[in-house]
Amino acid sequence: MSKTSERIFVKGNEAIARGALAAKCKCFFGYPITPQNDIPEFMSSAIIKAGGDFVQAESEVAAANMLLGAGATGVRAMTSSSSPGIALKQEAISYMAGSEIPAVVVNMTRGGPGLGDIGPSQGDYYQSTRGGGHGDYRHFTLAPGTVQEAYDLTIRAFDIAYEQRTPVLILGDAILGQMKEPIVPWEPENIDDNAGRDWAINGRTDGREKRLIKSLFLEEGALAGQNKKLQAKYDSWKGMTEAEQFETEDADLIICAYGSIGRIAKSAVRKFRKEGKKVGLFRPITLYPFPKKELKALAEQGKRFLTIEHNLGQMIDDVRLAIRTIADSDFYPVYPGNLPTPDELEEPILNCLEGK
Amino acid sequence: MTEMKEKLVFDRPESVIDRPTHYCPGCHHGIAHRLIGELLDEMNLAENTLLVTSIGCSVFLYNYLNVDAVEAPHGRAPAVATGVKRSRPDKFVFTYQGDGDLASIGMAEIMHAANRGEKMCVVFVNNTVYGMTGGQMAPTTMIGQVTTTTPAGRCQTHEGAPIRMTEIIASLGGVAFAARGALNNVANIKKSKKYLKKAFDFQLNNTGFGFVELLSGCPTNWKMTPLQANERIEKEMIPYFPLGIYKDVSEEGGVC
């Protein structure tokens, strides 16, 4: 159940900020970096008006640690950044994963490695889906492909983070963040403010036992126990996968692409369909957990695969792991530093379709 | 024959959990813990307190105080505490940090939390050395002090001078109270407790950031007896790190 309102025309970045407010995010901790500045700029006034708090931190490191502190109290909180900034936040994200502190982290990616550029890229796929910091952990990672989806998935990210006691990553890019589209905002009803609060630190006002949130486990076997618990949690996410399938039913060739590239590939698929060519799109929306089962089902139907990413080959590993016993996938990289168009994707798709 | 009755003159504060600590003999963390525990009892704060611990010997404060706590990464306790306090402004929030944690890796976090005037308290335990990792040089290590990474003694031209944190913190706009005490003798311990109480009061009055540095001994890494360590604090540390109140806005007028 939800309340909806009239359509508004907003950037992807603003949609994420608005989605967070709809999800009753109470604290936002930011630090400027292009191309995500619209999020902290919007939040600096909007979240205060909504009765929450905003801090422009002294660094990405500090912002992520402020998020850790707020998440530990059970209050809904978020930070956003872009690739080099997200790299700096990894320390706190690892601690949050280890301490089972919920939080929402937005990464509107840019080109890398290093300072790279401020244009779009999908070069942070490995970092996002493998756990970018130290130790054994995984991010729940959501990859919106439209501005509306950016809004919707932000709301979902908060629910997952607080139900699962885990940092959840929203992985967008400079295209999605800077693109304006009409969206229909909606507000979830009955947000459970007490979700997960039996663990949060909020003072022993009811005379209960003290609570301790930590990631240090020194006693023999204690860390193994914590890692086992975390792994079981990650395993339980297998049923939470989501993917968009477009024209896949009778397709001979499936394009695997996510986020902005998934959207651009969809335009290419539409064009090929008009020409009667049997091409379809498989767009993972949860990158971790990766929709293996859904993809494997397509492989079992004898389809061929082409993975297209705005990097030099990262999600291709997950595609191959999903279908490895039955099929393989070709790969076409869009080099970070280039802005891809649907036309650019036509030749590699055609080559693959014709078995070249 | 007169019956002799026992009179209890000294007991464990309720906020301090009844368990042995892991600290080395002669370490002053136990005294600092006790002072905080006494104040939490006396100010009736235990049930309203959220503690942020950091890395190093002091991280285990959460095992000894009966309050809700969260563990911060090395140096980041002031940022974590910022998040805790901003999300729960109704709670009493404090961090407890050592010198390596606060004055080295966490220098940015402490400076900015203080400058923003976060309504929280920081207890800074300065024993001029990295304790838990085995006695390496800290930003507060004294000139000539031998550590495992300054085997010939700290040299100012090579390693820089020991940093005086309280003086730096006192210069920042958001700070309501900054003081330096020591834990080497009874008089200094009593004064340190007064400083802590004042810092706690400033937070409860929602005035600004409170900072209390406590000069402490680390006999193990200093390779001294506990008594020699106390003497060192008096003779070497206090002259370089003078004790006293460096900022008190109740005397100067409030902060914004």
Image (cartoon, rainbow, N blue to C red):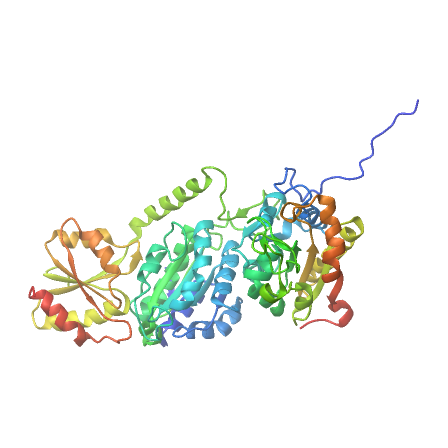
A286 relative position to B130: left or right: left
Q: Residue at x 25, y 69 (%)?
A: A261
| Residue lying furthest right | B1
Quarter occupied by residue A119: bottom left
Quarter occupied by residue A128: bottom left
Residue A253, percent from left and from top:
12, 62
| Residue lying furthest top | B1
A229 relative position to A212: left or right: left
A217 over A296 or under it: above or below = above
In this view, the residue in front, B252 or B29, is B29
Number of labels in the image equals 0
Residue A110, percent from left and from top:
34, 71
Quarter of the C terminus of chain A within the rendering: bottom left
Residue A311, percent from left and from top:
26, 67
| Residue lying furthest front | B152
Q: Residue at x 65, y 46 (%)?
A: B223
Q: Residue at x 33, y 46 (%)?
A: A236
Quarter of the N terminus of chain A within the rendering: bottom left
